[in-house]
Image (cartoon, rainbow, N blue to C red):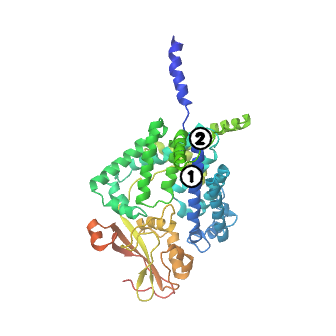
Amino acid sequence: MIDDALATPLSRLARLLDRDPGSGPLVARLYHRLLGLMFLVAFLSLGAQVRELIGQRGLLPLAAFLDRARGDLSLAGFPTLFWISAGDHLLTLGLWVGALLALAALCGLRPRLSLALSTVLYLSYATACRTFTSFQWDNLLLECGALALLLPRDRRARWIHFLVRVLLFKLYFESGIAKWQSHLHDWHDGSAMTFYYETAPLPTWLGWYAHALPAWWHRVESWATLGFELLVPFAIFGPRLARRAAFVLFTAFQGVNAATANYGFFCYLAAVLHVFLLDDDDLQRAQAWVRAKLRRPSPTKQAPPARSRFRAGVGRCTALIVTPLYLAISLAEGLVHFARGDGWDGFAEAIAPLRERIEPWRLCNTYHLFGHITRERIEPEIQTFDGARWTARDLRHKAGDPLRAPGFAAPHQPRLDFQLWFYGLSFQRATPEYVATLIDRLCHDPSAVERLFAASLPAKPEAVRIAFHRYYFTTRDERRATGAWWRRELIGASRSLSCGGEESPTEP
């Protein structure tokens, strides 16, 4: 009788552990195509600015850096193919190759191989660009690409699908933990969203309208976001209804992010991961609906190809090796970043050598988006002097002229515009290398960086400096009266650099 009593719950447990995850080859194929699109965007976006960023005359010249680093760095610590050569033509050619590989994945041409090569190539650029590709979504793209290589397209592979869901869980839940641990406690007291839209690195004009909403609404947004990221991610591993609800909520969340600020390809890449919350049945119904609207016949169903014992064995071995390894590294990284207390310091020190070997490859990461919200917006404004007056030289996408509406740039990410936002927050501490180089280029080689600016640059300015303004979104009344999207106040200026070697002009 005891055996009979145990049989039913044990069989139920076995079915639970072995249950069909829902997402299968249709989801995998859609993911490969959409990820190919994300790689295509990433390569084209970087291609529009790579020479200005790391070219021979760029802000952080790669060739010069590698020449200095030889002997101190190696491929293991600085994984990039450009150790071979870092000339401008090769930097450009590599991005065209990456775009073609991504296009092949988007079109379904050997997508796993194309995405694997895209990941290797993008890692080379992410490493080579250093400061300009230090964003969490660059890491996320690489982690997505690594998992895409393991994802079969002709059969269900529940463990690999499970790992992609783990990645999606990390993205949201770890960001929720970071908010919970914010040293400003701004998500707890409800003040975070009061500042979020105004101080986002590159807001859109819709962000201005969102900022103008009542204070009570921003408090609700703050608390709702915190609860959302700490609770909803558990639905990723829930039954079908819970996963569908999570799909809707996560996608709406990223829609708001994309509408109110420019975060490159991040919001769209996160939405690509959301497809793993759907089942193949969901996609089949969507396809049937589209075909009915277009009056297209339904395709004939084909049985999946039979796998040899060898391929099946390789698949099982891969799952047995990769799954525990990926989970262990993810857990260890999460504990190092988020665990609190003296007891965890020893753990972090113990695994530090392993982390030093793993981190440069960016294939298993932690995520802590918007852990706390900056409370003021300090904008560096680059100015040139022509002998009579200082003239502002606006970048294409940064807040500049208060009358200019904040625009849309995403999924393109203007890397310098974005990075200067961080410089504005810490300009009183030190001047980063890329800023010092930018000032020098404006003085002595303006054509090298002219494409980064909204208008043409003077060929021979007498001096260059940076002025720092504190920016605020205007109120509804101010906008109605002046037409301005911003109001600003000057808080200081850097020492001007004379371009001719003579004494610097007098500061106004």
Q: Residue 68 placed where, x, y %?
A: 63, 68
Q: Secondary structure at mark 1?
A: helix
| Label annotation for residue 34 | 1
- The residue type indicated by label 2 comes to Ile
Evaluate whether residue 332 shows in this view. Answer: no
Q: Check whether the beta carbons of the residues at disc 1 and disc 2 lie within 8 A of each other.
A: no
Q: Which of the labelled discs sits on residue 160, or is there none?
A: 2
Question: In the rendering, which numbered label is found on residue 448?
Answer: none
* Front residue of this view, candidates 504 and 219: 219
For the point 50% across and 66% down, the residue is 414
Q: Quadrant of the C terminus?
A: bottom left
Foreground of the two, 152 or 54:
152
Q: Is residue 394 left or right of residue 40?
A: left
> Which percent across, then down, holds residue 90?
67, 67
Residue 95 as seen in the image, left or right of residue 131: right
Callout 1, which amino acid? Leu
Q: Position of residue 52 (x, y in %)?
A: 57, 71
Instruction: Say few, some or many: other residues with alpha carbon within 10 Å of mark 2 (under 14 / 14 to 19 / 20 or more).
Output: many
Q: Residue at x 56, y 62 (%)?
A: 130
The residue at 42%/56% (across/down) is: 257
The local crowd at label 1, few if under 14, some if 14 to 19, many if 20 or more residues have their Cα within 10 Å, is many
Residue 198: x %, y % from top left: 36, 62
Q: Is residue 451 above or below residue 311?
A: below
Q: For residue 314, which quarter of the picture?
A: top right
Asked whether 29 or 465 is in front, the reply is 29
Left or right, residue 99 beside residue 166:
right
